[in-house]
Amino acid sequence: MRSLIKHVLTRTEATDSLEVAGWVRTRRDSKAFSFIELNDGSSLLNLQIVADANIPGYEEIHKMATGASISVKGRLIASPAKGQDWEMQASSIKLLGAVPEDYPLQKKGHSPEFLRSIAHLRPRTNLFGAAFRIRSRMAYAVHRFFQERDFIYVHTPIVTASDCEGAGEMFRVTTLPDDKISRDSEDFFEKRAYLTVSGQLEGETFACALSNIYTFGPTFRAENSHTSRHAAEFWMVEPEMAFCDLAGDMDVAEEMIKFLVKEALDGQDHDLSICEKFVDKTLRQRLEHVVEKPFQRISYTEAVKLLEASGQKFQYPVKYGLNLQSEHERWLTEEYFKQPTTVYNYPKEIKPFYMRLNEDGKTVTAMDLLVPGIGEIIGGSQREERYDVLLENFKHHKIDPEAYGWYADLRKYGTVPHAGFGLGFERLLMFVTGIQNIRDVIPFPRTPGHCEF
Ligand code: 4AD
Ligand code: MG
Protein backbone atom coordinates (compact mmCIF):
# COMPACT_ATOMS: atom_id res chain seq x y z
CA MET A 1 0.00 0.00 0.00
CA ARG A 2 1.30 3.41 -0.98
CA SER A 3 1.99 5.93 1.79
CA LEU A 4 0.99 9.57 1.60
CA ILE A 5 4.06 11.79 1.52
CA LYS A 6 2.56 13.96 4.27
CA HIS A 7 2.74 11.01 6.66
CA VAL A 8 6.11 9.83 5.44
CA LEU A 9 7.65 13.20 6.26
CA THR A 10 6.31 13.21 9.80
CA ARG A 11 7.61 9.73 10.68
CA THR A 12 9.80 9.44 13.70
CA GLU A 13 11.76 6.36 12.59
CA ALA A 14 13.57 5.29 9.47
CA THR A 15 12.00 2.37 7.64
CA ASP A 16 13.14 -0.31 5.23
CA SER A 17 10.23 -0.75 2.93
CA LEU A 18 7.93 1.97 1.76
CA GLU A 19 6.03 2.83 -1.40
CA VAL A 20 5.08 6.35 -2.42
CA ALA A 21 3.61 7.83 -5.58
CA GLY A 22 3.15 11.33 -6.85
CA TRP A 23 4.06 13.91 -9.47
CA VAL A 24 7.62 15.01 -10.12
CA ARG A 25 8.26 18.62 -9.15
CA THR A 26 11.91 18.71 -10.20
CA ARG A 27 14.69 16.29 -11.12
CA ARG A 28 18.44 16.71 -11.06
CA ASP A 29 20.71 14.07 -12.64
CA SER A 30 24.31 13.21 -12.08
CA LYS A 31 26.16 10.29 -13.65
CA ALA A 32 25.50 7.75 -10.95
CA PHE A 33 22.13 8.87 -9.56
CA SER A 34 19.21 11.33 -9.74
CA PHE A 35 17.45 13.48 -7.15
CA ILE A 36 13.70 13.84 -7.55
CA GLU A 37 11.45 16.18 -5.57
CA LEU A 38 8.17 14.29 -5.38
CA ASN A 39 4.80 15.75 -4.36
CA ASP A 40 1.48 13.93 -4.02
CA GLY A 41 -0.69 16.89 -3.00
CA SER A 42 -1.34 15.54 0.51
CA SER A 43 0.61 18.54 1.73
CA LEU A 44 2.83 21.24 0.40
CA LEU A 45 5.95 19.25 1.21
CA ASN A 46 8.03 17.31 -1.28
CA LEU A 47 9.82 14.07 -0.52
CA GLN A 48 13.33 13.92 -1.92
CA ILE A 49 13.98 10.66 -3.74
CA VAL A 50 17.53 9.48 -4.36
CA ALA A 51 17.54 7.06 -7.30
CA ASP A 52 20.78 5.24 -8.13
CA ALA A 53 21.35 4.56 -11.81
CA ASN A 54 21.37 0.78 -11.32
CA ILE A 55 17.86 0.35 -9.84
CA PRO A 56 14.97 -1.20 -11.81
CA GLY A 57 13.01 1.44 -13.73
CA TYR A 58 15.91 3.90 -13.94
CA GLU A 59 16.12 3.39 -17.70
CA GLU A 60 13.04 5.65 -18.03
CA ILE A 61 14.41 8.39 -15.76
CA HIS A 62 14.70 10.83 -18.67
CA LYS A 63 10.89 10.70 -19.02
CA MET A 64 10.37 11.62 -15.35
CA ALA A 65 10.16 15.34 -16.03
CA THR A 66 8.22 18.00 -14.11
CA GLY A 67 4.58 16.87 -14.00
CA ALA A 68 5.20 13.17 -14.73
CA SER A 69 3.61 10.65 -12.36
CA ILE A 70 5.78 7.95 -10.81
CA SER A 71 5.75 5.40 -8.02
CA VAL A 72 8.79 4.58 -5.95
CA LYS A 73 9.71 1.77 -3.57
CA GLY A 74 12.56 2.17 -1.15
CA ARG A 75 13.67 2.99 2.35
CA LEU A 76 13.35 6.14 4.35
CA ILE A 77 16.64 7.44 5.71
CA ALA A 78 17.69 10.48 7.69
CA SER A 79 18.54 13.19 5.21
CA PRO A 80 21.93 14.87 5.21
CA ALA A 81 20.38 17.79 3.28
CA LYS A 82 19.39 20.98 5.08
CA GLY A 83 15.69 21.73 5.67
CA GLN A 84 14.38 18.17 5.59
CA ASP A 85 14.50 15.31 8.09
CA TRP A 86 13.97 12.43 5.70
CA GLU A 87 14.71 11.35 2.18
CA MET A 88 13.98 8.16 0.34
CA GLN A 89 16.62 5.87 -1.06
CA ALA A 90 14.82 4.22 -3.97
CA SER A 91 15.13 0.47 -4.58
CA SER A 92 12.92 0.66 -7.69
CA ILE A 93 11.19 3.44 -9.57
CA LYS A 94 8.34 3.28 -12.06
CA LEU A 95 7.08 5.75 -14.60
CA LEU A 96 3.26 5.86 -14.50
CA GLY A 97 2.48 8.77 -16.82
CA ALA A 98 4.97 10.80 -18.85
CA VAL A 99 4.46 14.46 -19.83
CA PRO A 100 5.05 15.89 -23.26
CA GLU A 101 6.94 19.16 -23.52
CA ASP A 102 3.80 21.26 -23.70
CA TYR A 103 2.98 20.64 -20.00
CA PRO A 104 1.66 24.06 -19.03
CA LEU A 105 2.97 24.11 -15.46
CA GLN A 106 6.65 24.78 -15.61
CA LYS A 107 8.84 25.79 -12.71
CA LYS A 108 8.50 29.51 -13.24
CA GLY A 109 5.66 31.45 -11.57
CA HIS A 110 2.39 31.75 -13.50
CA SER A 111 -0.18 34.55 -13.33
CA PRO A 112 -3.54 33.86 -11.65
CA GLU A 113 -5.28 34.70 -14.96
CA PHE A 114 -3.30 32.05 -16.81
CA LEU A 115 -3.90 29.51 -14.06
CA ARG A 116 -7.65 30.19 -14.17
CA SER A 117 -7.59 29.17 -17.82
CA ILE A 118 -6.22 25.77 -16.77
CA ALA A 119 -8.45 25.20 -13.74
CA HIS A 120 -8.09 21.43 -14.27
CA LEU A 121 -4.33 21.61 -13.63
CA ARG A 122 -3.93 24.47 -11.17
CA PRO A 123 -4.46 22.37 -7.99
CA ARG A 124 -1.00 21.00 -8.79
CA THR A 125 0.63 24.33 -8.00
CA ASN A 126 1.76 25.16 -4.47
CA LEU A 127 -0.62 28.06 -3.89
CA PHE A 128 -3.74 26.40 -5.31
CA GLY A 129 -2.95 23.09 -3.65
CA ALA A 130 -2.75 25.00 -0.36
CA ALA A 131 -5.94 26.99 -1.05
CA PHE A 132 -7.98 23.88 -1.78
CA ARG A 133 -6.60 21.95 1.20
CA ILE A 134 -7.56 24.94 3.35
CA ARG A 135 -11.01 24.91 1.71
CA SER A 136 -11.49 21.27 2.71
CA ARG A 137 -10.32 21.86 6.22
CA MET A 138 -12.49 24.93 6.70
CA ALA A 139 -15.55 23.02 5.47
CA TYR A 140 -14.85 20.40 8.12
CA ALA A 141 -14.42 23.16 10.72
CA VAL A 142 -17.81 24.64 9.79
CA HIS A 143 -19.44 21.30 10.54
CA ARG A 144 -17.45 20.94 13.75
CA PHE A 145 -18.47 24.38 14.99
CA PHE A 146 -22.17 23.64 14.58
CA GLN A 147 -22.17 19.96 15.51
CA GLU A 148 -20.29 20.70 18.74
CA ARG A 149 -23.06 23.17 19.62
CA ASP A 150 -25.93 20.76 18.87
CA PHE A 151 -27.03 22.40 15.62
CA ILE A 152 -28.74 19.94 13.29
CA TYR A 153 -27.53 19.80 9.69
CA VAL A 154 -30.45 20.14 7.27
CA HIS A 155 -30.20 19.56 3.53
CA THR A 156 -32.30 22.30 2.01
CA PRO A 157 -33.21 21.89 -1.67
CA ILE A 158 -31.05 23.08 -4.56
CA VAL A 159 -34.05 23.27 -6.89
CA THR A 160 -36.76 25.51 -5.49
CA ALA A 161 -39.87 27.47 -6.39
CA SER A 162 -39.11 30.31 -3.92
CA ASP A 163 -37.00 33.44 -4.33
CA CYS A 164 -35.62 34.02 -0.85
CA GLU A 165 -33.92 37.34 -1.48
CA GLY A 166 -36.67 38.61 -3.78
CA ALA A 167 -34.05 40.10 -6.07
CA GLY A 168 -35.12 38.12 -9.15
CA GLU A 169 -31.59 36.80 -9.59
CA MET A 170 -32.53 33.17 -10.03
CA PHE A 171 -31.32 30.68 -12.63
CA ARG A 172 -34.27 28.92 -14.21
CA VAL A 173 -34.33 25.09 -14.23
CA THR A 174 -36.13 23.61 -17.20
CA THR A 175 -36.17 20.56 -19.43
CA LEU A 176 -37.84 22.38 -22.31
CA PRO A 177 -36.01 22.76 -25.59
CA ASP A 178 -34.71 26.28 -26.20
CA ASP A 179 -37.45 27.24 -28.65
CA LYS A 180 -40.22 26.26 -26.23
CA ILE A 181 -39.08 28.32 -23.24
CA SER A 182 -41.11 31.37 -22.43
CA ARG A 183 -41.66 33.32 -19.23
CA ASP A 184 -44.72 31.27 -18.34
CA SER A 185 -43.73 27.87 -19.65
CA GLU A 186 -44.05 25.06 -17.15
CA ASP A 187 -42.71 21.58 -17.63
CA PHE A 188 -41.21 18.96 -15.35
CA PHE A 189 -42.43 20.44 -12.05
CA GLU A 190 -45.60 21.90 -13.57
CA LYS A 191 -44.52 25.27 -12.25
CA ARG A 192 -41.49 27.45 -12.69
CA ALA A 193 -38.44 26.13 -10.83
CA TYR A 194 -35.10 27.71 -10.10
CA LEU A 195 -31.70 27.07 -8.54
CA THR A 196 -31.78 28.29 -4.96
CA VAL A 197 -30.26 31.64 -3.96
CA SER A 198 -30.36 30.70 -0.25
CA GLY A 199 -31.53 27.80 1.90
CA GLN A 200 -32.92 30.18 4.50
CA LEU A 201 -36.67 29.93 3.98
CA GLU A 202 -36.64 26.14 4.04
CA GLY A 203 -34.11 26.32 6.90
CA GLU A 204 -36.58 28.39 8.94
CA THR A 205 -39.17 25.61 8.75
CA PHE A 206 -36.69 23.21 10.33
CA ALA A 207 -35.58 25.71 13.00
CA CYS A 208 -39.26 26.08 13.88
CA ALA A 209 -39.28 22.36 14.64
CA LEU A 210 -35.74 21.38 15.70
CA SER A 211 -34.58 24.67 17.32
CA ASN A 212 -31.00 25.13 16.09
CA ILE A 213 -30.18 24.05 12.54
CA TYR A 214 -27.73 24.89 9.79
CA THR A 215 -27.44 24.27 6.12
CA PHE A 216 -24.20 24.33 4.14
CA GLY A 217 -24.44 23.91 0.40
CA PRO A 218 -24.22 25.46 -3.04
CA THR A 219 -26.27 28.54 -3.87
CA PHE A 220 -26.66 30.36 -7.17
CA ARG A 221 -27.10 33.98 -8.18
CA ALA A 222 -27.73 35.19 -11.71
CA GLU A 223 -26.43 38.65 -10.85
CA ASN A 224 -24.35 40.29 -13.48
CA SER A 225 -21.62 41.36 -11.05
CA HIS A 226 -18.12 41.50 -12.47
CA THR A 227 -16.24 41.88 -9.21
CA SER A 228 -13.56 39.94 -7.41
CA ARG A 229 -16.02 38.88 -4.66
CA HIS A 230 -19.09 37.72 -6.61
CA ALA A 231 -19.61 34.34 -8.20
CA ALA A 232 -22.70 32.88 -9.85
CA GLU A 233 -22.23 29.63 -7.89
CA PHE A 234 -20.95 29.79 -4.33
CA TRP A 235 -21.37 27.90 -1.07
CA MET A 236 -23.26 29.34 1.84
CA VAL A 237 -23.29 28.40 5.53
CA GLU A 238 -26.71 29.24 6.99
CA PRO A 239 -27.55 28.67 10.64
CA GLU A 240 -31.09 29.36 11.82
CA MET A 241 -31.96 29.54 15.52
CA ALA A 242 -35.40 29.43 17.13
CA PHE A 243 -35.89 31.47 20.33
CA CYS A 244 -33.11 33.82 19.19
CA ASP A 245 -33.07 37.58 18.57
CA LEU A 246 -30.76 39.90 16.64
CA ALA A 247 -28.23 40.23 19.47
CA GLY A 248 -28.03 36.43 19.78
CA ASP A 249 -27.61 36.19 16.00
CA MET A 250 -24.67 38.62 16.03
CA ASP A 251 -23.09 36.71 18.92
CA VAL A 252 -23.19 33.40 17.02
CA ALA A 253 -21.78 35.05 13.89
CA GLU A 254 -18.85 36.51 15.81
CA GLU A 255 -18.16 33.29 17.69
CA MET A 256 -18.25 31.30 14.45
CA ILE A 257 -15.87 33.62 12.55
CA LYS A 258 -13.42 33.57 15.46
CA PHE A 259 -13.60 29.79 15.63
CA LEU A 260 -12.97 29.43 11.89
CA VAL A 261 -10.12 31.94 11.81
CA LYS A 262 -8.51 30.22 14.77
CA GLU A 263 -8.85 26.90 12.97
CA ALA A 264 -7.08 28.39 9.95
CA LEU A 265 -4.27 29.65 12.19
CA ASP A 266 -3.86 26.46 14.20
CA GLY A 267 -4.17 23.81 11.58
CA GLN A 268 -2.32 24.45 8.42
CA ASP A 269 1.16 25.61 9.14
CA HIS A 270 2.58 24.96 5.71
CA ASP A 271 -0.48 25.91 3.70
CA LEU A 272 -0.98 29.20 5.50
CA SER A 273 2.74 29.92 5.15
CA ILE A 274 2.47 29.60 1.39
CA CYS A 275 -0.38 32.12 1.41
CA GLU A 276 1.79 34.39 3.52
CA LYS A 277 4.69 34.02 1.15
CA PHE A 278 2.81 34.52 -2.13
CA VAL A 279 -0.21 36.60 -1.18
CA ASP A 280 -0.04 38.56 2.06
CA LYS A 281 3.04 38.87 4.26
CA THR A 282 0.98 40.06 7.23
CA LEU A 283 -1.69 37.35 6.99
CA ARG A 284 -0.97 35.52 10.23
CA GLN A 285 -0.64 38.72 12.22
CA ARG A 286 -3.90 40.02 10.76
CA LEU A 287 -5.77 36.84 11.62
CA GLU A 288 -4.38 36.74 15.15
CA HIS A 289 -5.68 40.26 15.69
CA VAL A 290 -9.16 39.13 14.53
CA VAL A 291 -9.23 36.30 17.05
CA GLU A 292 -7.95 38.36 19.98
CA LYS A 293 -10.05 41.54 19.79
CA PRO A 294 -13.86 41.82 20.10
CA PHE A 295 -15.67 42.77 16.89
CA GLN A 296 -17.26 46.19 16.61
CA ARG A 297 -21.02 46.70 16.42
CA ILE A 298 -22.68 49.79 15.02
CA SER A 299 -26.16 50.63 13.74
CA TYR A 300 -26.65 51.48 10.08
CA THR A 301 -27.68 55.02 11.08
CA GLU A 302 -24.45 55.58 13.03
CA ALA A 303 -22.39 54.01 10.24
CA VAL A 304 -23.86 56.42 7.70
CA LYS A 305 -23.04 59.34 10.02
CA LEU A 306 -19.44 58.16 10.37
CA LEU A 307 -19.07 57.76 6.61
CA GLU A 308 -20.55 61.18 5.95
CA ALA A 309 -18.19 62.76 8.46
CA SER A 310 -15.15 60.86 7.18
CA GLY A 311 -14.14 63.42 4.59
CA GLN A 312 -13.41 60.53 2.19
CA LYS A 313 -14.11 60.88 -1.52
CA PHE A 314 -16.14 57.76 -2.25
CA GLN A 315 -17.10 56.70 -5.74
CA TYR A 316 -20.68 55.94 -4.63
CA PRO A 317 -22.77 58.34 -2.54
CA VAL A 318 -23.37 57.81 1.18
CA LYS A 319 -26.89 58.69 2.24
CA TYR A 320 -29.40 57.32 4.72
CA GLY A 321 -31.58 54.90 2.76
CA LEU A 322 -28.90 53.76 0.29
CA ASN A 323 -27.09 50.46 0.47
CA LEU A 324 -23.53 50.50 1.75
CA GLN A 325 -21.09 49.78 -1.07
CA SER A 326 -17.97 47.70 -0.73
CA GLU A 327 -15.79 50.85 -0.54
CA HIS A 328 -17.87 52.09 2.42
CA GLU A 329 -17.73 48.74 4.13
CA ARG A 330 -13.99 48.61 3.68
CA TRP A 331 -13.48 52.11 5.03
CA LEU A 332 -15.39 51.20 8.19
CA THR A 333 -13.37 48.03 8.83
CA GLU A 334 -9.98 48.99 7.41
CA GLU A 335 -9.64 52.68 8.17
CA TYR A 336 -11.97 53.37 11.04
CA PHE A 337 -12.44 50.36 13.31
CA LYS A 338 -9.54 48.26 12.00
CA GLN A 339 -11.48 45.16 13.03
CA PRO A 340 -14.47 43.13 11.73
CA THR A 341 -17.61 45.18 12.26
CA THR A 342 -21.29 44.25 12.40
CA VAL A 343 -23.67 46.86 11.03
CA TYR A 344 -27.31 46.35 12.13
CA ASN A 345 -30.81 47.85 11.84
CA TYR A 346 -30.94 48.80 8.16
CA PRO A 347 -33.79 50.80 6.58
CA LYS A 348 -36.58 48.39 5.65
CA GLU A 349 -36.72 49.62 2.03
CA ILE A 350 -33.34 48.12 1.13
CA LYS A 351 -33.86 44.72 2.75
CA PRO A 352 -35.94 41.62 1.88
CA PHE A 353 -39.48 40.85 3.08
CA TYR A 354 -38.61 38.38 5.83
CA MET A 355 -36.72 40.68 8.22
CA ARG A 356 -38.38 41.73 11.49
CA LEU A 357 -39.63 45.29 11.62
CA ASN A 358 -38.22 47.32 14.53
CA GLU A 359 -40.36 49.40 16.89
CA ASP A 360 -39.37 52.57 15.00
CA GLY A 361 -41.38 51.30 12.01
CA LYS A 362 -38.47 52.37 9.73
CA THR A 363 -35.71 49.86 10.23
CA VAL A 364 -35.50 46.08 10.21
CA THR A 365 -33.37 43.76 12.34
CA ALA A 366 -30.83 43.12 9.60
CA MET A 367 -27.16 42.62 10.30
CA ASP A 368 -24.15 42.46 7.98
CA LEU A 369 -20.75 41.41 9.24
CA LEU A 370 -18.00 43.27 7.40
CA VAL A 371 -14.32 42.32 7.43
CA PRO A 372 -11.18 44.19 6.37
CA GLY A 373 -10.05 43.46 2.83
CA ILE A 374 -13.41 42.16 1.65
CA GLY A 375 -16.42 43.97 3.12
CA GLU A 376 -19.60 41.93 3.65
CA ILE A 377 -18.91 38.33 4.55
CA ILE A 378 -22.17 37.59 6.42
CA GLY A 379 -25.74 38.80 5.93
CA GLY A 380 -28.47 37.89 8.40
CA SER A 381 -31.43 39.04 10.47
CA GLN A 382 -34.03 38.29 13.05
CA ARG A 383 -37.06 37.07 11.09
CA GLU A 384 -40.54 38.58 11.13
CA GLU A 385 -42.41 36.13 13.32
CA ARG A 386 -45.70 38.09 13.54
CA TYR A 387 -48.29 36.64 11.17
CA ASP A 388 -50.07 39.93 10.42
CA VAL A 389 -46.88 41.88 9.84
CA LEU A 390 -45.57 39.18 7.52
CA LEU A 391 -48.78 39.26 5.47
CA GLU A 392 -48.37 43.05 5.20
CA ASN A 393 -44.80 42.51 3.98
CA PHE A 394 -46.05 40.07 1.33
CA LYS A 395 -48.38 42.77 0.06
CA HIS A 396 -45.71 45.44 0.10
CA HIS A 397 -43.18 43.24 -1.74
CA LYS A 398 -45.83 41.90 -4.18
CA ILE A 399 -45.33 38.33 -2.99
CA ASP A 400 -48.08 35.82 -3.70
CA PRO A 401 -49.34 34.80 -0.22
CA GLU A 402 -50.59 31.51 -1.59
CA ALA A 403 -47.21 30.47 -2.96
CA TYR A 404 -45.65 31.30 0.42
CA GLY A 405 -48.52 29.92 2.51
CA TRP A 406 -46.22 27.29 3.98
CA TYR A 407 -43.84 30.05 5.13
CA ALA A 408 -46.68 32.04 6.72
CA ASP A 409 -47.90 28.85 8.47
CA LEU A 410 -44.79 28.94 10.67
CA ARG A 411 -46.17 32.20 12.08
CA LYS A 412 -49.69 30.81 12.38
CA TYR A 413 -48.84 27.64 14.26
CA GLY A 414 -46.76 28.21 17.38
CA THR A 415 -44.67 31.09 16.11
CA VAL A 416 -41.38 31.92 17.86
CA PRO A 417 -38.78 34.66 17.58
CA HIS A 418 -36.03 33.29 15.38
CA ALA A 419 -32.93 34.52 13.61
CA GLY A 420 -30.16 33.35 11.32
CA PHE A 421 -27.53 34.40 8.84
CA GLY A 422 -25.63 33.36 5.75
CA LEU A 423 -21.85 33.23 5.56
CA GLY A 424 -20.39 33.29 2.05
CA PHE A 425 -17.96 30.38 2.32
CA GLU A 426 -15.69 31.65 -0.47
CA ARG A 427 -15.50 35.09 1.13
CA LEU A 428 -14.40 33.40 4.35
CA LEU A 429 -11.72 31.56 2.37
CA MET A 430 -10.55 34.82 0.80
CA PHE A 431 -10.33 36.28 4.28
CA VAL A 432 -8.26 33.47 5.80
CA THR A 433 -5.95 32.94 2.81
CA GLY A 434 -5.55 36.58 1.77
CA ILE A 435 -6.38 35.51 -1.81
CA GLN A 436 -8.03 38.49 -3.41
CA ASN A 437 -10.14 37.00 -6.16
CA ILE A 438 -13.07 34.70 -5.44
CA ARG A 439 -12.24 32.81 -8.66
CA ASP A 440 -9.10 31.55 -6.98
CA VAL A 441 -10.75 29.87 -3.98
CA ILE A 442 -13.39 27.97 -6.02
CA PRO A 443 -12.25 24.84 -7.81
CA PHE A 444 -14.26 25.63 -10.97
CA PRO A 445 -15.53 29.23 -10.74
CA ARG A 446 -18.73 30.26 -12.50
CA THR A 447 -19.00 33.96 -13.27
CA PRO A 448 -20.78 35.89 -16.05
CA GLY A 449 -19.46 34.51 -19.35
CA HIS A 450 -17.52 31.69 -17.71
CA CYS A 451 -18.61 28.06 -17.45
CA GLU A 452 -15.72 26.35 -19.19
CA PHE A 453 -15.59 22.98 -17.51
O1 4AD B 1 -26.57 38.73 2.19
P1 4AD B 1 -27.11 37.52 1.48
O2 4AD B 1 -27.74 37.73 0.16
O3 4AD B 1 -28.11 36.84 2.52
C1 4AD B 1 -28.91 35.77 2.26
O4 4AD B 1 -28.92 35.12 1.26
C2 4AD B 1 -29.71 35.36 3.47
N1 4AD B 1 -30.87 34.60 3.00
C3 4AD B 1 -28.84 34.55 4.41
C4 4AD B 1 -29.55 34.12 5.67
O5 4AD B 1 -29.94 34.98 6.44
N2 4AD B 1 -29.68 32.83 5.89
O6 4AD B 1 -25.94 36.46 1.31
C5 4AD B 1 -25.22 35.98 2.42
C6 4AD B 1 -23.74 35.97 2.14
C7 4AD B 1 -23.15 37.35 1.84
O7 4AD B 1 -22.86 38.05 3.01
C8 4AD B 1 -21.91 36.98 1.06
O8 4AD B 1 -20.87 36.60 1.93
C9 4AD B 1 -22.35 35.74 0.31
O9 4AD B 1 -23.46 35.21 0.98
N3 4AD B 1 -22.72 36.06 -1.07
C10 4AD B 1 -21.94 35.81 -2.15
N4 4AD B 1 -20.74 35.23 -2.22
C11 4AD B 1 -20.21 35.11 -3.46
N5 4AD B 1 -20.82 35.48 -4.60
C12 4AD B 1 -22.04 36.07 -4.55
N6 4AD B 1 -22.64 36.42 -5.68
C13 4AD B 1 -22.65 36.25 -3.28
N7 4AD B 1 -23.83 36.76 -2.87
C14 4AD B 1 -23.85 36.64 -1.54
MG1 MG C 1 -26.24 40.74 1.88
Image (cartoon, grey):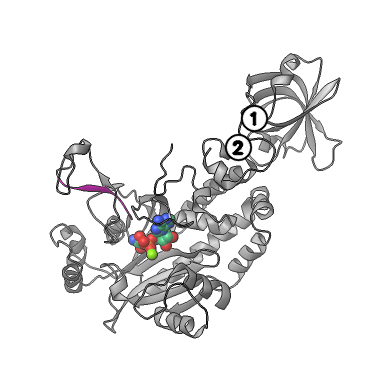
Check if residue 194 falls in the magenta segment: yes
Relative image position of residue 226 (x, y in whole percent): 43, 55
Check if residue 35 falls in the magenta segment: no
* Residue farthest toward the left in the current orientation of the protein: 402
Is residue 17 shown to the viewer in this render?
Answer: yes
The span shown in magenta is 191-197
Q: Which residue is drawn at 71% across and 16% down?
A: 60
Element type at marker 1?
Answer: loop
- Tag on residue 271? none
Task: Looking at the picture, tell me which residue is in the foreground, 142 or 364.
Answer: 364
Report the label total: 2
| Amino acid type, label 1 | Gly
| Amino acid type, label 2 | Arg
Circle 1 residue: 67
Q: Residue at x 45, y 45 (%)?
A: 445
Q: In this view, does 120 lie above or below 130?
A: above
Q: Which residue is drawn at 15% across and 44% down?
A: 185
Quarter holding the N terminus is top right
Q: Residue at x 68, y 30 (%)?
A: 66
Q: In this view, does 124 lie above or below 253?
A: above
Q: In this view, does 223 lie above or below 60?
A: below
Q: In which quarter of the image is ligand 1?
A: bottom left
Tags 2 and 1 in contact by the CB under 8 Å rule? yes
Relative image position of residue 194 (x, y in whole percent): 26, 48
